Amino acid sequence: MVPRPRSAPETARRSGTWRNWGGNITASPAREESPASVEELAGVLRRAAGQGLTVKPAGTGHSFTAISATDGVLVRPRLLTGIRHIDREAMTITVEAGTPLKRLNAALAREGLSLTNMGDIMEQTVAGAVSTGTHGTGRDSASIAAQLAGFELLTADGTLLHCTPEENADVFAAGRIGLGALGVLTALTFRIEPVFLLTAREEPMPLDRVLAEYEQLVTENEHFEFYWFPHTERTNTKRNNRSQGPARPLKKLSGWFEDEFLSNDLFQAVNSLGRAVPATIPAVARLSSRALSARTYTDIPYKVYTSPRRVRFVEMEYAVPRAEVPAVLRELKAMIERSRLRVSFPVEVRNAPADDLALSTANGRDTGYIAVHMYRGTPYREYFTAAEKIFTAHAGRPHWGKVHTREAAHLCEAYPRFAEFTAVRDRLDPDRLFANPYLRRVLGD
């Protein structure tokens, strides 16, 4: 059990309206707490339970679902950050749960180390990233949660569980993607490796060719992804493969021009125009699809995997069996073409190998990820509803942190180990201290 603090810490404050990054979710917590230690966090849980309030941790708000929304106590992990320990013999790193991914990546790079794979942004906290199944793209390497060697979890009764394949193995098996439903993560231990170089090859390619050669492109490259621009026949592809070097980073000026000016500043402007005058979107999409030219560069992993993303949007992403990706893209394209929709954001397509995490979207099957986006403030429900109908027809599983309408009755059929997860939840949080409407919808009560 965690010892009781001698007195209640001065970490609480009244909370106003909480909003997520995408702006599509708001909540009005009774109060916010920013505990500075596990002991203080345990006190937060006790006080909330005594007052009949629920508790939800919220990091940077990069989820597009209401997974962190609460009218109870909102726990902000801004003081629970930092590197606890690097074990070079075991090749692991243990970090506090509130540590941003960008801080983790920078710390690893300074030590000549790296995660094997990561997503395309690094603003999230490590706890938020693993809890929702954040992933990048990879033929052989899976999500961030799949790289966990262990974690600490503070449960509803104040017990601090150390979870590994050997200790509290059932909680480790269920909780690597825990949705915040089992307790509050306090520390995470990731498997790491010596830093390596990746050569990124980015080039435009016709959509028909990408879909015809999709399986070949995935199997021949360690990491393959592409972006299709709706209202066009064009994509931008990216292939990342390990390299012996030497490092050839992007030149400062050309990197700024493509990653900052074109992909953020100009993209922001054209999306604002499209929101104001939707009829301009197809023409702008054709111009946008031709704006990025082919380029090749070699750098350390996080500088290749991740990119700045400052244009705000709302997103839906589904995981489908990898073999279904070409068919799903063709149906999505046909749906947009016969509709009145005007879509200014590209569709993102990635992949991952099968894994064994209970609530992983890649559980038990090689997976393709298809993500649709709409610019923040633009109506998105018509587009997402039509896309979701296509995704679910192809055995799609929704990303836990992105917009979807699936409920527990559907998800328990989509996930073979769903009942295993809910049984652990029933044991660790029988009174639903960590519940909210989103979790009641996707997990049942």
Image (tube, helix red, strand yellow):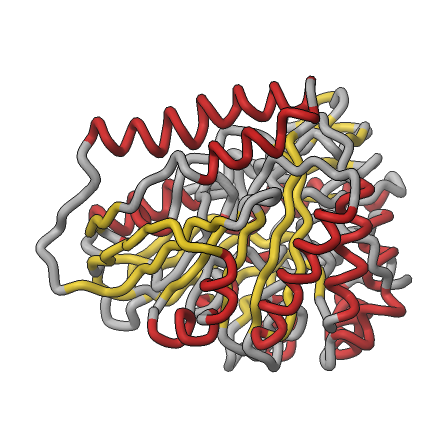
Q: Nearer the viewer, residue 311 or 337?
A: 337
Residue 199 figure quarter: bottom left
Q: Is residue 108 rendered to the left or right of residue 181?
A: left
Residue 37 in sight from this viewpoint: yes
On screen, residue 157 above or below 352:
above
- Taking the spot 52% from the left edge, 24% from the top edge, the residue there is 268
Position of 312 relative to 44 (above/below): above
- The residue depicted at 36 percent of the width and 51 percent of the height is 305
Is there any visible trace of residue 48 in the rendered image? no
> Could you tell me which quadrant the C terminus lies in?
bottom right
Residue, x 66% and y 47% (percent of image)?
Answer: 42
**Image quadrant where one finds the N terminus:** bottom right
| Along the viewing direction, whichever of 167 and 341 lies nearer the viewer | 341
Q: Which residue is painted at 21% across and 39% down in the image?
A: 250
Q: What x and y, as percent, mark residue 378?
A: 72, 29
Left or right of 124 on screen, residue 410:
right
User: Which of the 4 image quadrants contains residue 174?
Assistant: bottom right
**Is 55 located above or below residue 365 in the figure?**
above
Residue 370: percent from left, percent from top: 60, 58
Q: Position of residue 364 (x, y in %)?
A: 61, 81
Q: Is residue 287 left or right of residue 59?
A: left
Q: Give the left or right position of residue 356, taking residue 276 as reference.
A: left
Q: Nearer the viewer, residue 388 or 79?
A: 388
* Count of marks placed on residues: 0
- Residue 79: percent from left, percent from top: 51, 35
Q: Residue furthest left?
A: 246
